[in-house]
Amino acid sequence: MGRGGKVGLGLGGGIVVLIGALLGINPDMLSSLLGDTGSQPAIEQSSGAGLASCQTGQDANERLDCRILGTANSLNSFWPGYLKEYGVGYSVPKTVIFTGSVSTACGQATSAVGPFYCPGDNKAYFDPDFFAQLETDFGSSGGPLAQEYVVAHEFGHHVQNLTGTIGKAQQGSKGEQSLAVRTELQADCYAGIWMRYASSQPAPGSSQPFLKALTQKDLNDALSAASSVGDDRIQQAATGRTNPESWSHGSSAQRQKWLYTGYQTADLAACDTFAAPKV
């Protein structure tokens, strides 16, 4: 995917297993998923059904591309006001829904790479077939919250691009305390912040939150999704052993810890993984 400032940052190391949750997008949210975030929704689609038919929360519960769209627009509605309190401006990234392969500023990519964010073109890339592959090949439940967590994580990388921390992923070596791992854990933490607000604050143009209220079971399921993309779990499944010195995304325990930190504190400063003595 390239090196330096144009490297693409994804959810895991190529082999990703997500354990889904029962939580879905609130079907009572009747405002259009195409929404109004101050500008036209930044969505590209290379193939498949038109996204113009994605209008309600029920559409998002029934169609994966609509769920990706709805989650992206929820994130684009949430982050500008939140980041403004920290003196950070927000530019809306494009969300690209593709099939098979796609050309990016970070290089050519296929769905095998998994969802990723490319800072070279400020776009988050998602192949809906990838989520189906997780379910059929890796035994994922395909639960909505697992998929929404994936989208929120990639948007976390966009927030890092805006705050100037994304480049740290390419500094130093790999390992469980490396800057690469700290970059990924911070994106998990940012995803947790969005989960907190998306399930408790009304969505723009609606009196209902984007997500149904989280129960403890829902939260446990989300933490399980983060655990599933831990480097140790992926390595154990692929090779039967783990090697912390080669980690680039963090262990299952680390990813759970920082996703929950974001959800519990809803505080950008609490997500400063780079200042933590140990992650």
Image (tube, helix red, strand yellow):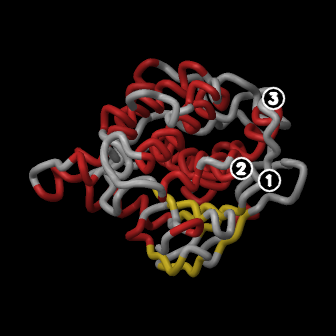
Amino acid type, label 2: Leu
Question: Residue drawn at (67%, 27%), measured in percent from left and top?
Answer: 197
Q: Position of residue 26 (x, y in %)?
A: 64, 34
Q: Position of residue 111 (x, y in %)?
A: 44, 70
Q: Nearer the viewer, residue 204 or 11?
A: 11
* Of marks 1 and 2, the one in the foreground: 2
Please name the residue that numbered disc 2 is placed on: 162
- Judged from the image, the secondary structure of the residue bearing numbered disc 3 is loop
Please report contact status of discs 1 and 2: CB closer than 8 Å, yes or no. yes
- Judged from the image, the secondary structure of the residue bearing numbered disc 2 is helix
Between the residue at mark 3 and the residue at mark 2, the CA separation in whole angstroms equals 14 Å
Which of the marked residues, 1 or 2, is nearer the chain's N terminus?
1
Residue 71 placement, left or right of 111: right
Q: Nearer the viewer, residue 205 or 75?
A: 75
Quadrant where the C terminus sits is top left
Q: Position of residue 183 (x, y in %)?
A: 49, 46
Between the residue at mark 1 and the residue at mark 2, the CA separation in whole angstroms equals 8 Å
User: Residue 199: which quarter of the image?
Assistant: top right
Q: Position of residue 110 (x, y in %)?
A: 45, 75
Amino acid type, label 3: Glu
Please name the residue that numbered disc 3 is placed on: 85
Check residue 91 in the rendering and tell me which mark sits there, or answer none. 1
The residue carrying pointer 2 sits among few (fewer than 14), some (14 to 19) or many (20 or more) residues within 10 Å by Cα, namely some
Question: Residue drawn at (80%, 27%), measured in percent from left and top?
Answer: 207
Report whether residue 83 is seen.
yes
Q: Nearer the viewer, residue 235 or 142?
A: 235
Q: Residue furthest right?
A: 38
